[in-house]
Image (spheres, grey):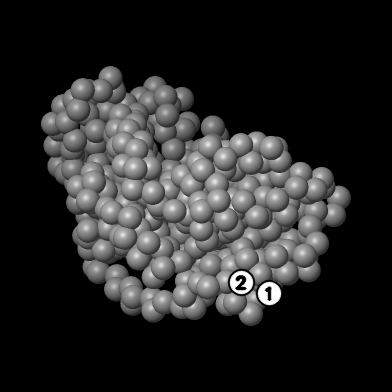
Amino acid sequence: MVINQTLSNGVRVVMEPIPYVQSAAVGIWVRAGSIDEAENQKGISHFIEHMLFKGTEKRSARQIAEDCDWIGAQVNAFTSKEATCYYMKVLASELQSACEILTDMFMHSRFDPEEMEREKNVIYEEMKMSEDDPEDDAHDLLQERIFRGTSFESPVIGNREALSAMKQRDLQEYLYNQYTADHIVVSVAGNIDPDQVCAFFEKTLQGLKPSKTDVPFEKPEYRPEHFVKVKEVEQSHLCIGTQGVTLDSELYYPYSVFSNLFGGSMSSRLFQKVREEKGLAYSVYSVSHSYSLLGIFSIYAGVAHDKVEELLEALAEEFQLLKKEPVSQREMHMAKLQLKSSYTFNQENVNSRMFSIGRSTLLMNSVRSSEEVLGKIEAVSLQDIACVVDRLSDISGYSGVLVSRNDLDLKGWIK
């Protein structure tokens, strides 16, 4: 059973006691990510995530690492377009110690200027690593085009120019204005005492700015864009896509089921057509990814430089085949079972359960039970899938990105 509570300090706590396990996971979630950044702040959410590990008023960066190791913790953090999360997984007996380290980082980080300059260099290397991975690069470039004109178009990691100019005061001001009590969720799952958890965070998360005003989101009209990045790579990396659905959309689960049966497994239509029948690609898949305000449906494939046009023809052919040979009950049964299996396997991990209830509470203000999620997957009908096919089958409306050593006519081929 999931327990929701709003503390007197304004912070929400969501907990799932699991008494039969010996571990616990805790995360502090903040609804602040790259979409909240001004032009001169691009990458500041991600930079703050790094800096919270670089020393507090009573711990150096080394002491934070050693204290985490002392309690046997798995500790990490991540930044996304809509949120930032700091989390630990520990033995249940060490949960209070884990919470103390996390809140010390969260509330008392120093943002030492010398540490900031060192960490900027680390992030520059992270940027290079991402750019050196043409698959990741293609996905980032595609999102930039599909979300053009919105706060979602910028990459989470930001850019070198904005990052290099950031000073201690910039991070402190952003933290104060964005890390507000009403935009923070503490998520805890595992062998826990809910009363103790609430009492701890009631005491330690004091002094936060109570609230912030969310900027109204305006969704511009989507227009497809096409871009070829010429780079010396061994194969061409193609990523095409269009706007998808939001987390609360009625089509969220139909999109998930369709993406799985179309390009989410070895038996999927794309895998069988592109890899098994035509031998065009080693890696080919489709993804439906949803945010609270926008969504994206995309297809990726790594292909020989001289086979890009043939690949696009195969993708268009497969979409047309969906109309001639609609999805069968057998295909849909397999796709549903794969999704339900993946979800159930994750539910057996306390970290995954902490992520699930924390993200849902932060972004949707609600938590779906396991029974509800599995029921919604099972309830997807062939009619729902036909609706998704109607929305996605015309790839002439897709944006496209190609990372290749050849400057090819991508726009002319997506038709």
**Which amino acid does the dot numbered 2 rest on?**
Arg
Residue at the image point whose x is 44% and y is 38% from the top: 285
Residue assigned mark 2: 12
Q: Where is residue 71 drawn, in percent x and y?
A: 71, 41
Q: Are marks 2 and 1 in contact (CB under 8 Å)?
A: yes
Identify the disc placed on residue 288: none
**Observer able to see residue 361:** no
Q: Quadrant of residue 341?
A: top right
Image position, residue 296 (x, y; %): 38, 55
- Residue 324 placement (x, y as % from top left): 42, 48
Q: Amino acid at mark 1?
A: Gln
Left/right placement of residue 182 relative to residue 241 reads right
Q: Secondary structure at mark 2?
A: strand
**Residue found 32% across the figure and 33% down from its top:** 125
Q: CA distance from mark 2 to mark 1?
A: 6 Å
State the residue in front, 20 or 249.
20
Instruction: Please tell me the numbered disc located at residue 5.
Output: 1
Q: Nearer the viewer, residue 246 or 334?
A: 246
Badge 2: few (under 14), some or many (20 or more) residues near its Cα, within 10 Å?
Answer: many
Asked which secondary structure carries label 1, the reply is: strand
Residue drawn at (39%, 22%) of the image: 279
